[in-house]
Amino acid sequence: MGRVFCQRRGPGRVYKHAMAVAIVDDSMRALVTEAQQGSRSAADQLVREHDGWVRGVIYGVTGRFDQVDDVAQQVWAQVWERLGSLKDPQRLKSWLYSVARNAAIDAGQARRRKQTAGLERVAEVCEQHGDGPVTAAIGDETQRELLRAVAGLPALYREPFVLRHLEDWSYAEIGALLGLPVETVETRLVRARRLLREALKGKVES
Amino acid sequence: MSDRDQDLERLISRYLDDESDARERRALRHALRREPRMEALFEEASALDREVGIAIRKALGRSAGRCRRVLPPWNGLGRLVAVGLAACLALAFLAWPARPPATTARYAGQGISGPGSWFAPPPAMRDAYEAAPVSLDRPRLRLDRADRNWIVVPGDRPGEYLVVEIKRVHSRSFVIQGDF
């Protein structure tokens, strides 16, 4: 992953950045090893360091921020159950990504299955139209409109877009996590922006 | 959308994501200058990007404070003015006649000369006694109901204090009622 990060830096910074990445990798490896051995503080630190982008992935996949808390809890529960099976601690990030992505997809499918039930469907519709408790907490009508537009994006585009805005990651970092070439990440972000502009045309005042 | 528009859209997206290099920024700058339509697109895209970013962060319980670059640095006359002003201030500061620092005046009477420059290290401190005006007013006695009071009185020499322990007979008053 360090090699990928270096691609976007100037040549003068490559060495220092590679050093920093190596140090981060070492500390992460140590942290994962400690967590695998049952250290509670190491586990806490892992959650603190990675919970933010894990939630970003969940939101990117589901497009529903009211599901993020629940799915994130499931993800971390699964992580603690299966952490021992992680052979290479350096692959923690991609491993976490796959766990989070699968949990988010499962949650989305489960939700769709439940939609046949009446009350669930009513709650869904209310939430989508901005009447639910979570959207009400957002407060601003403009922001609700923006979030509806983001939720309307295909997951393909929403995922890198959310990671970009939530974590401020570079194309290379997003690509490394999603397993995509940098050019694909770039194309998806361009399309996400175009779709958002089209979706919001005339709806939100400039 | 023409190929050229798509190229510009890609340049804008890369710029907003802080991924564009100097050549791309230059190309974008020229395109925005030439085509007001593209400038409008740029402003729309940057405003949308900022607002969506804030909305997403807020929705996921993050602070909305992360402000990313949304205005091109070349677009603001204010930026140019600010840089010029900063340069003028720096020049004025460097060209200002060296004035003795306040520390020089303070140590003038003690044979310590000031270095005469703002950037020189301050003179080494040495033990010196500086007579401070001391008020020799006697403090008011505290006449409360205590049997014993401690009173601190400034002495004749600065820094000298006298501690006076006062013992007095406990006194009390009461109303005498009677037929006189």
Image: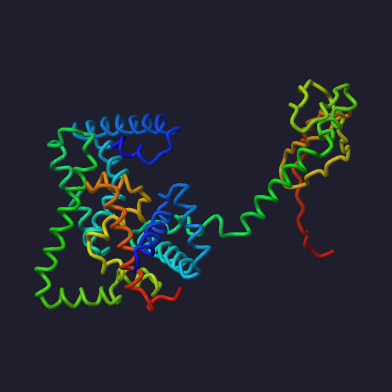
Image quadrant where residue B14 sits: bottom left
Q: In the figure, A176 relative to B163: above or below?
A: below
Q: In the figure, A117 relative to B69: above or below?
A: below
- Residue A114 screen position, x and y as percent: 10, 70
> How many numbered marks, from 0 up?
0
Image quadrant where residue A50 sits: top left
- Residue in the picture at 90% in, 26% down: B109
- Residue in the picture at 69% in, 50% down: B84
Q: In the figure, A141 relative to B79: above or below?
A: below
Give left or right: position of B103 versus B41.
right
The front one of B29 and A38 is B29
Give left or right: position of B135 versus A126.
right
Location of the N terminus of chain A (image quadrant): top left
The front one of A158 and A41 is A158
The front one of A49 and A119 is A49
- Residue A52 screen position, x and y as percent: 31, 50
Color style of the picture: rainbow
- Residue A9 screen position, x and y as percent: 40, 39
- Residue B82 screen position, x and y as percent: 65, 53
